Image (cartoon, grey):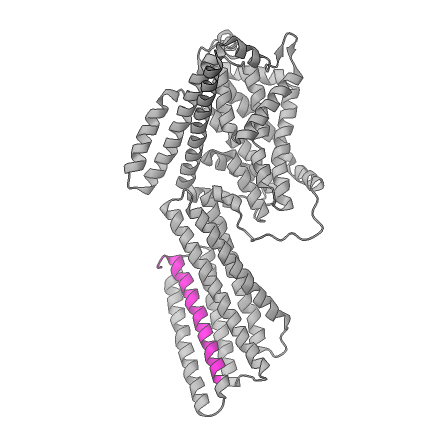
Amino acid sequence: MNTAEIVEIVFKVIGGLGIFLLGMKNMSEGMQTIAGSRLRAIINAITYNRFLACGVGTATTMIIQSSSVTTVMAVGMVNAGLMTLVQAIGVVLGANIGTTITAWIFTFKIGGYGLHIVGISALFYLFSKKDRLKFWATFFLGLGLVFFGLKLMGSELKPLSKNPDFQTWFGSFSPITEHGISYLKVWQCCLVGACATAIIQSSSAMIGLTGILAAAGTIDFTTAAALILGENIGTTVTAVLASIGASTNAKRASLAHVMVNIFGVLWVTAIFSVFVGFASEVAIWWTHCEPSLLAERILNKTTEQEKDIKIAIAIAHSSFNVVNVIILLPFVGILAKMLTNIIPDKGIKEVHHLKYLDVRMLETPAIALEQSHKEIGHMADTTERMLNLLEPQLFDLNADEHNNEKIFNKENVLDNIQKEVTEFLSKTLTGHTSLEQAEIARCHIRLADEYESISDYVTALLKLQLKLTKNEMVLHEEGKAELKELHKDITEYFKMINDAMKTNNSDILSKAQTKGSAITFKIKQFRTQHLERVSAGKTSPLHSLIFTDMLNSYRKIKDHALNVAETIAGAK
């Protein structure tokens, strides 16, 4: 085999790998979009129960077909303060179990039908008018590309298995020596698997490639098992990269992923011959094959019944991860304390850019929308606190002047949040989102704008009060009592709508319209009474302007609050 032929094979294998990775991406995005609401429900189910957190990690990874995305998501949620370190470790352990399903998918002998699946799926994707059907087509399009990519890589790598030079080269990686299994050579294979996985950042691709090499007879099952162990270490690189620039707790979460997988490899390599024998025995039982024949297929590089060795690889991958999780799950709390000692807290309080949003969530639009909803809730709470802080500043002569600074500061914060929520959701919309998700994103952008506008009018009211103070003026007692009553009504009205927004209560609109009309009527009534006081000479023209502007600001707050209710109800 000359150099030109080798180069051609290498590029074809790289092409097959590219098609495989594109297929995995389409599978993940399609399933994420289909299961959007379920994903949000799953992630909300995380509690301090480590077993439930592990189950959430498993389910999420099985749905989105990517342990990397799940662990990056966990790092992002820890960084946003939405998940504790103990919960994140539970999710990471679950992700390690969930990712084992990929190896089992590769055992299906449908590689020759990859192009058929691609063709049929593409027709549905191009000509279907139903949004949900399009996303199912995306998923199956990805599945077809995965199998087609595996077939391409397999067809190109098979000739290499017959080449004496490559047989010698690959044989040098085998842990089996004339004296039995070499511990150092096992770790050599582990390092090769770890480095290769770290480079392409896809353990699924490496497991698929390992299966192809084993099925082609290029490597034996023992080598494949050692490579799989290393691939479990290499996949942790993605979470480590995601933790760069994140909070201390997020760095601990990513290190937890590394430590969990390295610990697993350490104890498995210590009993590697037992591990390989166990996987072989389970494969013999699973396939109902003659033990001697299957052992020959698995251990001695024969190409008969390729599915059998792929099943053995899937068993090895699953047993390693499942047993490792069973061992570590009871010690999650201890691991969290150990990580706290390894990465201690900083001397200063860490301030997150935003309370909930994190760019790491953009890989999963369903979770990104869930987090943006929490950020909108944070905006609502902040605006409500501004209204509560405003009351003594307007009506109490002995009010704390520091509250003025707090109100202005919160208004500036909400300006920044509104800007970043809009940018975050705009990036989400450019991804693979369904019409339902796109509508939710637009709804969140609208809500962010409404809450920011309310904060503007709260500060406008404060500025009007400061103008009165500067000119050494006070409101007429009747006018002050009217404003105090109005402030109470607006605050209660705003809280009612905020509660509905947090629970997505779309039935709030009729109630909001009724109470909003009552507030509008009261504002008109107070304006009329104020004009009567002006006519009677009870108040000055400057008092009149400020009082009228205050009424207008309260009405604007009511209008924007009503807009929030209309947005929740889908009326706008």
How far across and down, in percent of the image, does residue 436 sit? 37, 48
Which residue is found at the position 42% from the left and 33% from the top?
27
Relative horizontal placement of residue 118, taking residue 10 as reference (left or right) = left
Q: Is residue 565 magenta?
A: yes
Can you see residue 287?
Answer: no
Residue 338 sits in which quadrant? top right
Which residue is more in the foreground, 532 or 153? 153
How far across and down, in percent of the image, does residue 106 sit? 45, 23
Q: Is residue 172 magenta?
A: no
Please tell me whether residue 223 is drawn above or below residue 431 in the rendered image.
above
Which residue is found at the position 61% from the left and 30% from the top?
261
Q: Which residues are magenta?
A: 544-572
Assign the C terminus to one quadrant of the image: bottom left
Considering the whole magenta stretch, tell me its main secondary structure: helix
Which residue is more in the foreground, 499 or 180? 180
Can you see residue 191?
Answer: yes
How far across and down, in percent of the image, does residue 101 sit? 48, 28
Which residue is more in the foreground, 203 or 334? 203
Please tell me whether residue 433 is drawn above or below residue 495 in the rendered image.
above
Please tell me whether residue 46 is drawn above or below residue 304 in the rendered image.
below
What number of labels is visible? 0
How far across and down, in percent of the image, does residue 28 sit? 44, 35
Residue 25 sits in which quadrant? top left
Relative horizontal placement of residue 566, taking residue 128 as reference (left or right) = right
Please tell me whether residue 567 is drawn above or below residue 520 in the rendered image.
above
